[in-house]
Image (cartoon, rainbow, N blue to C red):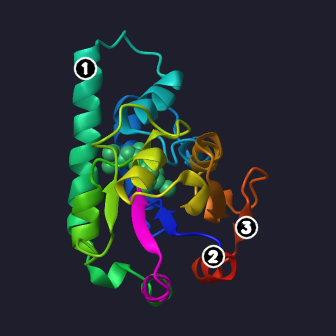
Amino acid sequence: MKYKAVIFDLDGVICFTDEYHYQAWKILADELDIPFDRTINERLRGVSRMDSLEIILEKYTGPELSAGEKEKLATKKNDIYRKSLENMSPSDLTDEVRETLNSLRDKGLKLAIGSSSKNTRFILKQIGLEDFFDAISDGTNITRSKPDPEVFLKAAEFVDEKPVDCLVIEDAEAGIDAAVAGGFDGAGIGSAAGYKKATYRLDSFKDILKYI
Ligand code: B16
Ligand code: MG
């Protein structure tokens, strides 16, 4: 096999919480009279909560916001988002993802999560994968957001493998950039499928099996 471990991004790869992120940011943006649409939302993929807020505030024209007010806005968005997550269940995991993960495990690969989200463990619990992965690197153990490679470097360290022996699966261009910056091969899926910096293009999750 070409790799010893696979590091999965979470939102947009294992499950689809991206729509919930969009809906929650949209409520906040509307309240602040900020133009916000799905094109701007694409820029938030893989980006941390506070960095996402800064992107949304680029079009804000109201009175200047203090750091504390920005924290409050981010918390408000997260409260709305968490309410949506409460409705998630193991049925939000597709058969294709479940079967592919099991095949990769059967082949002896180490499997890890590399997500910017501070809600990672809650989401994994909701979809019934809380005990599945060998390691979880997420927004709670990093100080720099993708495209910085920190989250993936930590994931590789947690499974005790070198970046060159790990394949990163990502739906965000910022995530593929992070993989490249860390010395990982990166497979792009969804929004990152056609990204030129990706080592592989995944038209479907099960395509991972072609490249390991
Ligand atoms: P949270 P990923 C990312 O997850 C999302 O793509 C991004 O939209 C979000 O802002 C970020 O997590 C932080 O999420 O607010 O839950 O900490 O794609 O890296 O799994
Ligand atoms: Mg993602």
User: Real-space Cα distance between discs 3 and 1?
Assistant: 41 Å
Disc 3 is placed on an element classified as strand
Q: Estimate the x, y position of residue 147 in percent, counting from the top left.
A: 56, 38
**Observer-nearest residue: 163 or 13?**
163
**Observer-nearest residue: 5 or 12?**
5
**Can residue 193 be spotted in the picture?**
yes
Q: Quadrant of the C terminus?
A: bottom right
Q: Which of marks 3 and 2 precedes in the sequence?
A: 3
* Badge number at residue 201: 3
At label 2, which amino acid type do we have?
Ile
Mark 3: C-beta under 8 Å from nearest atom of ligand 2: no
Mark 1: C-beta under 8 Å from nearest atom of ligand 1: no
Relative vertical location of residue 176 with respect to residue 83 in this rendering, above or below: above
Image quadrant where residue 19 sits: bottom left
Q: Estimate the x, y position of residue 149 in percent, counting from the top left.
A: 52, 40
User: Real-space Cα distance between discs 2 and 3?
Assistant: 13 Å
**Cβ atoms under marks 2 and 3 closer than 8 Å:** no
At label 3, which amino acid type do we have?
Arg
Magenta stretch?
Answer: 102-114
* Badge number at residue 69: 1
Disc 2 is placed on an element classified as loop
Relative vertical location of residue 89 with respect to residue 159 in this rendering, above or below: below
User: Real-space Cα distance between discs 1 and 2?
Assistant: 46 Å
At label 1, which amino acid type do we have?
Glu
Q: Which residue is mark 2?
A: 212
